[in-house]
Amino acid sequence: MPATLDLIRALGWLDPDRYLESPQATPAQLCRYHTPEYIAALQQAEVEQSAPPEIRERHHIGAHGNPVYREVFRRPATSAGGAILAAQLTRGGGIVHVPGAGTHHAMPDRASGFCYINDPVLGLLEWLDLGLTNVLYLDIDAHHGDGVEYAFCNDPRVFTLSVHEAGRWPFTGKLEDHAGGHARNIPVPQGFNDTEMEHVLQAAILPILRHLRPQAVMLQCGADALDEDPLARLSLSNNAHRAVLRALIPEAPRLIVTGGGGYNPWSVARCWAGIWGTLDGRPMAGRLPPAAEAVLRALEWHRSGGRNPPEHWFTTLVDAPRPGPLRAEVVEACDAVLEGLPEPAMPAPAG
């Protein structure tokens, strides 16, 4: 995330008149979804930089892949503050990009999947508290947006749609899981390519969007579905993420775009900077200017993929397209999620 903002600054795209620092959400705001006991445990873990056995067991802080780190409360609370502020800023319409948000696995009383606070849920709840009654949450992270689906499985005001790798942790989000009719899941096979994402966009995402006619859309734009990511086996280029975004912009009266997963620092920074540039109408073709290139050359990644990074990771935002075959299971999944869609929620009466 810091590299994303550094890259955007180096490109000269950070207009101070349209950039706001995310505020840290208060415990009271966080308890709109999370339990007070859990929030207190997160705060205490940050102070002590450890968690006792009962907290690890009850809240999964310091356990199950959720380590205690220096800002284990402040960092996710600030992401949540950004998501809440984004909802407030779009009350009357518009678009806000919150690349630091997107932690979609956190549950009301426990951390999950390196997500401690569910900032998408808190942003969506803020929209509902402002009076919206028909909201679409779209998740294109490689992992199922289980925490958001769980939060709204009994709330017809929020429809959740997740496109994610089949058989990948958290091992939820099967095609047949409909969460009371207000959720759809499109689990896709390994090697999922740009051609297949374009089909999902045209044959499932846009038809659902146009059927529901939501008052607002939140797009969780995790970068771990990209080919270079080490924690998934999907094969998208970052062109696919921008194509989804471009299709949503004219259809969404209000739009919040978050980050999400992503574990290759070069692909994350390039993808999310490209999302920022797409929202701002910036040209992205050609070689990056020296200052932006320097940001990317300064990154380090202590995995095998970081030992000999390809030159284009330093010199351009735009991946080469990654087309491929359109497989039958992708076509069939898109057809299946259109069956039995609920009727669009009607806006609440004024006043």
Image (tube, rainbow, N blue to C red):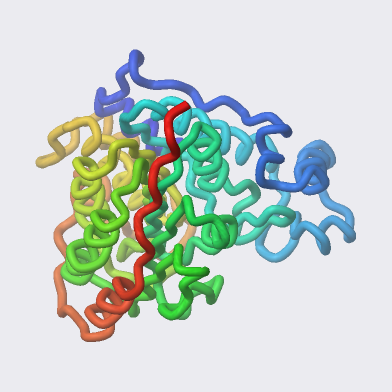
The mark total stands at 0
Q: 248 or 10, which is in the foreground? A: 248
Q: Relative to residue 117, is residue 267 drawn left or right?
A: left
Residue 197 in percent (x, y) is at: 23, 66
Q: 262 or 30, which is in the foreground? A: 30
Q: Please, is residue 311 above or below residue 99 in the view?
A: below
* Identity of the residue furthest to the top in this view: 17
Residue 208 in percent (x, y) is at: 28, 61
Residue 311 visible in the displayed image: no
Q: Which quadrant, please, contains the N terminus?
A: top left
Q: 308 or 323, which is in the foreground? A: 323
* Identity of the residue furthest to the bottom in this view: 328
Q: 293 or 55, which is in the foreground? A: 55
Q: Residue at x 34, y 13 (%)?
A: 17
Q: Quadrant of residue 232?
A: bottom left
Q: Relative to residue 29, is residue 217 drawn left or right?
A: left
Q: Residue at x 20, y 68 (%)?
A: 203
Residue 240 in percent (x, y) is at: 22, 57
Q: Please, is residue 12 above or below residue 75 in the view?
A: above
Residue 38 in percent (x, y) is at: 78, 48
Q: Relative to residue 282, is residue 228 drawn left or right?
A: right
Q: Residue at x 18, y 69 (%)?
A: 199
Residue 32 visible in the displayed image: yes
Q: Residue at x 41, y 70 (%)?
A: 185
